[in-house]
């Protein structure tokens, strides 16, 4: 059931079978360094989100450049990270269910593990699992920053939950999970700045309320690729959870910088490599990458090698490109790079990254947390 | 990289970890038999589409009930089927690229293999690969039935390509691939009937033109779950390619029968099993199944266990259910069955089917062609 790699090291890019998930290593490394450089000296550290890449090889590169560790969304993702050598993992999510909690505590024997909560009933189950394992578990209170997904409300509800954590002998209050997801793709710089200003105010007020009640809050963790500069400069957030910055995608590419131009903070480094498999008419080319090779929740991919071509329609295994405006003929057998609309769920469709430097396959990285949904 | 199963045989459903892909075996078996019964005596046989299930265990059940074999969309899917014991596989797609063609011919040593073409350049490459393998390959002319994806136009262009197949010593013309994909989800019975009447006319005219030119066309293959009754009764189609009928999904469930009621031809048998992981407010419940656990290209899933609840928004690992109208409280830790919007790309996210009979896990089937995109 493990799909073999679509390439071998040393091949030229053109020899790589399709569809394949390729990483432009030069662009990828520039992205890695750019974030490290941008936050150097701010006192805020990166806890990179591994939900994007699902690959311990990449996680360890992030740690090498200064990340304190990674975040995951699922216990099974955390397993892949810990078994791949990562020693500090925060599950930025509620974990519910006895099997999951036992597995989470199993990891605590190998690494520093944190988890989030937004309900007293979760604390009861976390306590049982931690007691059974004979460990103390770091628990973060997830606070609703405005996305109205998980999380208690800021202020008194967060204080209440933090106090309750303190009532459990095997749980220790570790800080606030304060990620404002719905701010990440607000298109203008001002909208994002304003949204994060609101999140910062909520996080600071909650922190101060905790302190006034004798509960020190040393960690406020959150932020994503769209907003990290605001959290980094807030004086309130202590950790950033950026994930997509390493790859970017078409959707993040539509965010605008302060000057109104499309964001230049990072550059696309992740592509789906596809073949033109049918050229039935002058105005359309059919590629071999459809709904099972790309995520479409944030729109279709961009045709990187021919911006005048448009990915018009996806079916399960086909993509229909409109090419009437293209200067590249996109002939039968030609291969093209597509920039995914959304990187995270696209990565989750593949078992391997094909790392390419220039025209040459340099490395193959296994996506060990691919499909790690539980 | 193989994700372990989320269940063990003998468990109760409630013990199955989430998210998991569960199959209600009773409903699944009824669907299998219903199609077999519906086409018994028509002279038309099923060539079930394995792109839906990606699982040789299921393919062999279809063959047991009379299917001539299966179809696949990708060479890697065909590999999974042949290595899983299926002995007749038609790749209902163009196959472009030397590596893929060599792998395709590798399968021809173990099974009867067919493939489609819609361009003379493909024939040249198919011929090379077949000659290299010392085999004769069955080639179907794919005809555009109106979906405007792949395929030559009906009539003279199809005749021209069929003639060219005959010019290649290692290729043999096997019939017409005449699938009308865009007709499958036309909502009313009359719309679907009319669309397929058009496809039947095109296929028949092409068949007759071939015959008039001395090229017998013994196989016309096509049809899907939405339209099979029309192709089966056409007197023109000889094979049906239904795939989704075994599972159904929310999108197919919106098709209407002749009497205007939602289709009763088949019933939902495939579910994503999810846990309520957060209950932050009275009107919303957050489940642990998002964009990496369900396909959203054909809309969100239905909440099977509480039809008044709606799956309102997906993020990568979360689903937000609106439950204001629900009578089921959907408490923290409760598990629910979700009917995927679209079965095929949902299946492609999982490594295992958890087969459940009543409340008991009866079987675990590996989805060996999961991720088989090339």
Image (spheres, coloured by chain):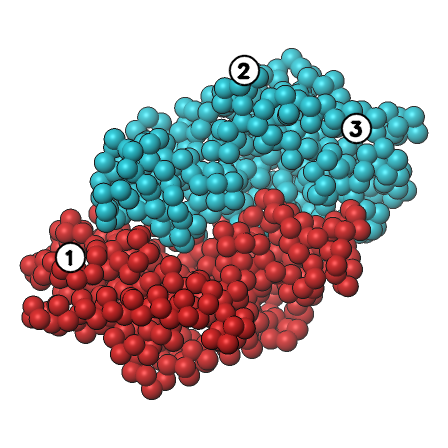
Chain colours: A cyan, B red
Disc 3 crowd rating (10 Å Cα; few below 14, some 14-19, many 20+) is many
The residue at which mark 3 appears reads as A202
**To which chain does the residue with label 1 belong?**
B
* Measured Cα–Cα span from mark 3 to mark 2: 28 Å
The residue at which mark 1 appears reads as B157
The residue positioned 25% from the left and 31% from the top of the image is A327
Residue A1 in sight in this render: no
Residue B92 vs B263, above or below: the answer is above
Residue B120 in sight in this render: yes
The residue positioned 67% from the left and 49% from the top of the image is B320
**To which chain does the residue with label 2 belong?**
A
Q: Nearer the viewer, mark 1 or mark 3?
A: 1
Same chain? Circles 3 and 2: yes
What element does badge 1 sit on? Answer: helix
The residue at which mark 2 appears reads as A259
**To which chain does the residue with label 3 belong?**
A
What element does badge 2 sit on? Answer: loop
The residue positioned 50% from the left and 38% from the top of the image is A343
Residue B139 vs A34, above or below: the answer is below
* Measured Cα–Cα span from mark 1 to mark 2: 54 Å
Instruction: Tell which circle, 3 or 2, labels the residue nearer the N-terminal end.
Output: 3
Q: As drawn, which residue projects farthest toward the top?
A: A41
Q: Are marks 1 and 2 in contact (CB under 8 Å)?
A: no
């Amino acid at each position: 059931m493990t799909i073999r790699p679509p390439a071998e090291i040393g091949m030229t890019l053109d020899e790589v079978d399709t569809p394949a998930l390729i990483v432009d290593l030069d662009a990828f490394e520039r992205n890695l360094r750019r974030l490290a450089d941008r936050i150097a000296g701010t006192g805020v550290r990166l806890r990179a989100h591994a939900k994007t890449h699902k690959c311990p090889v990449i996680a360890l590169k992030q740690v090498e450049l200064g990340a304190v560790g990674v975040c995951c969304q699922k216990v099974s993702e955390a397993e892949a990270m810990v078994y791949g050598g990562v020693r500090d993992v925060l599950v930025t999510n509620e974990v519910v269910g006895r099997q999951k909690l036992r597995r989470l505590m199993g990891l605590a024997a190998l690494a520093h593990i944190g988890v989030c909560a937004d309900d007293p009933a979760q604390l009861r189950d976390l306590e049982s699992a931690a007691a059974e394992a004979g460990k103390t578990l770091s628990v973060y209170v997830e606070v609703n920053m405005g996305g109205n997904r998980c999380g208690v409300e800021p202020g008194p509800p967060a204080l209440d939950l933090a106090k309750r954590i303190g009532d459990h002998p095997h749980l220790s209050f570790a800080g606030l999970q304060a990620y404002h997801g719905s701010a990440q793709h607000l298109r203008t710089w001002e909208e994002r700045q304003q949204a994060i200003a609101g999140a910062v105010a909520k996080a600071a007020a909650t922190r101060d309320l905790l302190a006034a009640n004798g509960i020190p809050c040393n960690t406020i963790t959150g932020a994503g690729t769209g907003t990290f500069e605001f959290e980094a400069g807030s004086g309130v957030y202590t950790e950033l959870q950026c994930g997509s910055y390493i790859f970017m995608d078409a959707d993040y590419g539509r965010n605008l910088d302060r000057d109104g131009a499309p964001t230049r903070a990072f550059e696309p480094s992740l592509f789906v490599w596809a073949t033109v498999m049918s050229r039935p008419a002058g105005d359309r080319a059919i590629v071999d990458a459809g709904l099972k090779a790309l995520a479409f929740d944030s729109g279709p991919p961009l045709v990187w090698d021919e911006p005048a071509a448009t990915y018009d329609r996806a079916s399960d295994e086909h993509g229909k490109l409109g090419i009437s405006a293209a200067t590249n003929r996109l002939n039968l057998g030609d291969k093209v790079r597509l920039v995914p609309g959304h990187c995270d769920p696209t990565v989750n469709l593949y078992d391997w990254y094909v790392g390419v430097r220039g025209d040459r396959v340099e490395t193959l990285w296994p996506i060990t947390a691919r499909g790690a949904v539980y």
